[in-house]
Amino acid sequence: MKVIVNICVHKAPKRVESLKRTVEAIEKQCDKINIQWNGFSGDEIPKWAIREPIINSYGTDYSDLGKFTFLEFIKEPCYYITLDSDMLPPPDFIKQIKQDIEKNKCIVTYHGRILNRRNRTTFYEGHHTLKWNNDVKADCEVDVPGTGLMGFRTDYFCPLNLHLTGHEKMADLVFGYYAKLHNKKIVCAKHSRSWIKSLNLKGIWHEFNEGKRKKPETLQVQMMNEIMDL
């Protein structure tokens, strides 16, 4: 079964630079790399990305849901791996995530959140988070996956049109909701804190904190509660 890695990148120079390193770290481990260039024109795609095994899609900005645009083109079962453009997967990443998928028979991530059913008012605080950069000593079922380090078999789950939901910067919640809706299990797999590296770019979590919560969590909390109610 083929391994297809899917990444979306935002229109920022640092993101493009980090994407190149992410691709270099993963390309020898997989069969194909799909890149969604959010908001880019075809002329803006760097030359290093115009080659095999990379498939490029550009134009519309789907935010972090862009990593799911390629699901509609899957013609036969595959391992569908989603990565953030600031992660540096280790040389055994694909081998390990395939093993974890087969062992657990479900969606696998290395970062996830177990929702606290007593906390109905905030998503970013008050829940138990299993982090990619902390030791996770045993496989653990989670409600919301970290879609920047995730994989699944498309013959187990193949949710179409997630990128059309319009929920910007909410890929983890959107995916978690549809997985729960279809009774699909998500496991945060065992790993050590030193296994995966980061390029230390500021992601969505940092953007949220630095904005000092100027934007309310209304949509996040609504979707979180919908997950808990399913």
Image (tube, helix red, strand yellow):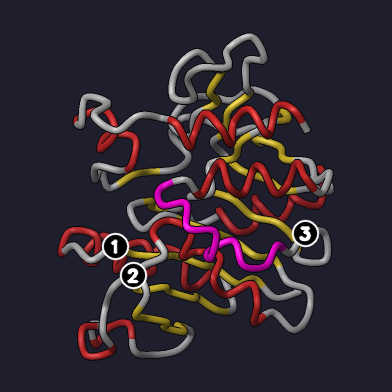
Q: Position of residue 198 (x, y in %)?
A: 33, 44
Q: Position of residue 152 (x, y in %)?
A: 70, 56
Residue furthest to the top in view is: 118
Q: Which residue is mark 3?
A: 157
Pointers 2 and 1 in contact (CB under 8 A)? yes
Label tally: 3
- For the C terminus, the image quarter is top right
The residue under label 3 is which amino acid type?
Phe
Q: Which residue is mark 2?
A: 38
The residue closer to the viewer here, 223 or 33, is: 223
> At numbered mark 3, what does the secondary structure look like: helix, strand or loop?
loop
- For the N terminus, the image quarter is bottom right
Query: Image check: 199 left or right of 228?
Result: left
Identify the image quadrant of residue 98. Answer: bottom right
The residue under label 2 is which amino acid type?
Asn
Measured along the vertical axis of the image, is residue 2 above or below residue 87?
below
> At numbered mark 1, what does the secondary structure look like: helix, strand or loop?
loop
Report if residue 139 is visible in the image.
no
Task: Determine the residue positioned at 70% across, 75% down.
Answer: 2
Which label number is shown at residue 10?
1
Magenta run includes residue 66: no
Q: Position of residue 67 (x, y in %)?
A: 50, 64
Q: Marks 2 and 1, Cα distance to the nearest angstrom?
A: 5 Å
First of labels 1, 3 by sequence position: 1
